Image (cartoon, rainbow, N blue to C red):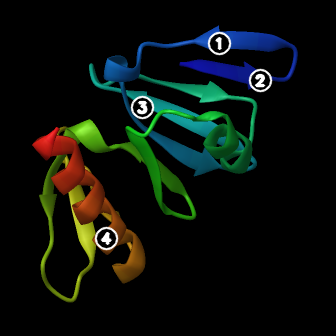
Amino acid sequence: MKIISKNQILFYKNDDVIRFEASAGNAIIHFLNGTSAEINEPIQSIEKQLTDLDFIRVHEDHIINVNYITKIADDFSDSIELENGVILPVNKKTKEMIINLLNNHISQ
């Protein structure tokens, strides 16, 4: 993936990125190996740059790599859990979209 941030272009492997998180007008990129890095770009800009279907915005502050979802709560909590144990909120509409996306993704 390619992320344009201020006066630089950053390149990452999709499989290395587990999620993006909004942070005071910037974004934090969280990697599968547990490290993270701040990107001088708002999460809205990151979302527009991600053209890969593996990434989806699940909350105003979070974009996730759907390949690392381990659990989708089927209760009133409306949350998802990622492979690294992080639990994130998700609204009902987005949760349904993720389930449909994963069903289509798995059947291919």
- Which residue in the protein does label 2 denote? 5
Picture layout, residue 44 above or below residue 20: below
Pointer 1 with pointer 2, Cβ within 8 A? yes
Sequence-wise, which precedes: disc 1 or disc 2?
2
Which element carries disc 4, helix, strand or loop?
helix
- Disc 1 crowd rating (10 Å Cα; few below 14, some 14-19, many 20+) is few
- Of the residues shown, which amino acid type is indicated by label 3? His
Most foreground residue, 71 or 98? 98
- Disc 2 crowd rating (10 Å Cα; few below 14, some 14-19, many 20+) is some
Distance CA(mark 3)–CA(mark 4): 21 Å
- Which residue in the protein does label 4 denote? 95
Residue with the most extreme bottom position: 76
Distance CA(mark 2)–CA(mark 3): 16 Å
Point 43% across, 40% down: residue:
53
- Which residue in the protein does label 3 denote? 30
Residue with the most extreme right position: 7
- Of the residues shown, which amino acid type is indicated by label 1? Leu
Point 17% across, 38% down: residue:
108
Point 12% across, 44% down: residue:
107
Picture layout, residue 30 above or below residue 83: above
Point 73% across, 11% down: residue:
9
> Residue 55 placed where, x, y %?
43, 41
- Disc 4 crowd rating (10 Å Cα; few below 14, some 14-19, many 20+) is some
Q: Is residue 71 left or right of residue 99?
A: left
